[in-house]
Amino acid sequence: MTRGEELRPLYWAMVSLGVVGILILSAGLLDFFSFEPLGQRTGAHATVRGVFHYDPETKQVNGGDTRRFTADDAFAAEVDWTSLPASMVVDAHWFNILGTDVGGVGPQPAGELVDRSVIPVKIPEGFKHNLPGEYDFVVERYSGGQPVEVLARRLVYVRSAV
Amino acid sequence: MSVDAAYPRLARPPHYKLAIALAGLLVVCLFLSSFVTSLVLGTIPSRISVFGLPVIALVALATWIGVRAFDRDPAERRRHLLRAGVILGIAFLLWLLLVDLFLFTGDAPLVALISAIACLPTTAFGIWVVRRLDRNEKEPWRLVMVAVAWGAVVATALVIWVNTSLGEIAASALVPGPGMDAFTAYGAGFFEELAKGLAVLLLYLVMRDEFDDVVDGIVYGACVGLGFNFMESILYMTHMYAIFAGEGFGAHVAGIQWYFRQVVGLFFGHATYTALIGAGLGVARQLPLMRQRVLVIVGGWLVAISAHFAWDAWLQFFPVGDGAFALIGVHLRTLLMNGPFTAVVLLLLAMGLQVEGQALRRQLELEAAGGTGTVAPAEVAVLTSPWRRWQARMQVLTLSGLGAYRRLARLQQAQLNLAMERWHRERRELGAPLDAEERLRQQVLALKA
């Protein structure tokens, strides 16, 4: 067996694996652009008035705009939906540190959400407190049945209650 | 095989200089990255800057001293290795401290320590298994442990910067959901495999005499991956504990993390990805043309990145079912998503072992026919079969005791090293003087005497 023949199967195996890698990464690009389609920037911005302590009884916010809470605190974001065109389909959601949706409204036209400006964080079912960590509040524009553009974003930090 | 290194160097070869340049570039990149990140991202990355840079400097210093140990007088080797070991140990402890600070919870030091203790036996088992896969010529423990340490400390330190920065970019620009997941998966796949693969690349450049072929590449790559997985497991266990401790089931969630990362995913995740990079480098080690070498190295890296990407990005699409089926589903998910890549690694390993085995048999037969006395014709069949080698050692152990067993083990290893050296010379893969081979021959004869 010559010097080249000995390693030929391994050489071609590695080259083929490289091609497989390119195919998988290309599929990943398609996946990415199907959820993040190009040319979706409208320039619109939603106004988030702030993130406040929230009273679940009265369903009202109180105090000043805050960035830090404890796991026992109830809190909510307040959005000025009139800052967006009334026909624009939007939603607003809270995501906890695990990326789980923990409360939100929509998707609906912004004009129909005017009386739902306060969006509280819900404690996940079976839990006693909010999970500690970063919470991401995102207002998104919808097109073709999927979110395509971020119109506003707020990040707050929740400290452990123990 | 440090004593019988295939070709002791009289001067630093070009690839050695390339390795030094790469390591230097790495440190500079980390320094710049840490400086920029600490300015832009605030408190947590600043803490990483403060503690991460000394860790990297210490690992770089330990590696340099470790490499010196292989190049210097054997009498000084022990001293150098001891120093390198102590410095690596300090780096490791500092890194654990960094992990704690990164998580900045009051419970973290104890939880991190318990997590580390829980991950040690499983990772040690993984390293033992991987090293044993190299049936003909096991890699020296010190190099295996250097690979593990680099995977655990340097690679994880490198990617925390990048992952933090990419997370910030994704959060500020992308819609939460599968698109953002794909973006972060691209980042994790590319940068984590780059960081881990660099360790294997440095071994390939610096330790050519201990990096023989695709089998060695797979072993070193998997060891880097196991080291990375060890540290990542501690980080996730501590992190998950901190999140769920307030609900009273922090330990339970940390335990689940341990099971899926240290039991189910021990060989299926990082070990497999980095083994694919190692396979590419191992095949490249024996190819004559630069173009071919680059192609297989890039091929290994691409498939490793894509395997990692596929797991991170598409995990959520795999249906795991409900209730009792979920338990089966999550195991099946690992098997079906990462299993094919692990199977490819095993296939490459089998192909490599077959090529290596045939070559060693041929070289041993030629050596026996040469009449130098290093290998008797009757020994060839024993030396080419791991099972028969073991049987021969056990026979000697029973008849003559442990000392004789060790002597025979050393002799068998030296004979295989000589055959390996001959194979590399036949393939014109050595730029070293012929006396290296003669020196191995003398060593075998001395052991026989």
Image (cartoon, coloured by chain):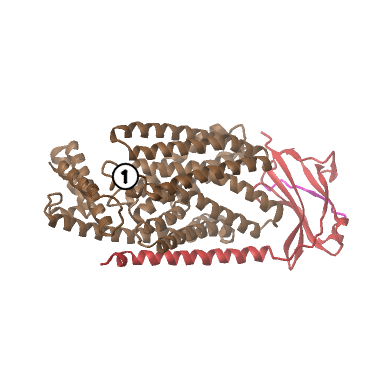
Chain colours: A red, B brown
The question of residue B286 being in magenta is answered with: no
Q: Residue at x 54, y 32 (%)?
A: B110
What percent of the width, then of the height, locates residue B383?
Answer: 20, 52
The span picked out in magenta is A114-125
Q: Which residue is mark 1?
A: B9
Relative to B239, residue B331 above or below:
below
Q: Is residue A115 magenta?
A: yes
Question: Which x, y percent locates residue B124?
Answer: 40, 42
Residue B213, by quadrant, is: bottom left
Depth check: B327 or B74 in front?
B74
The front one of A76 and B437 is: B437
B380 displayed left or right of A29: left
| Quadrant position of residue A84 | bottom right
Quarter of the image where the C terminus of chain A is located: top right
SS assignment at label 1: loop
Task: Give me the residue at 67% from left, 53% from top.
Answer: B170
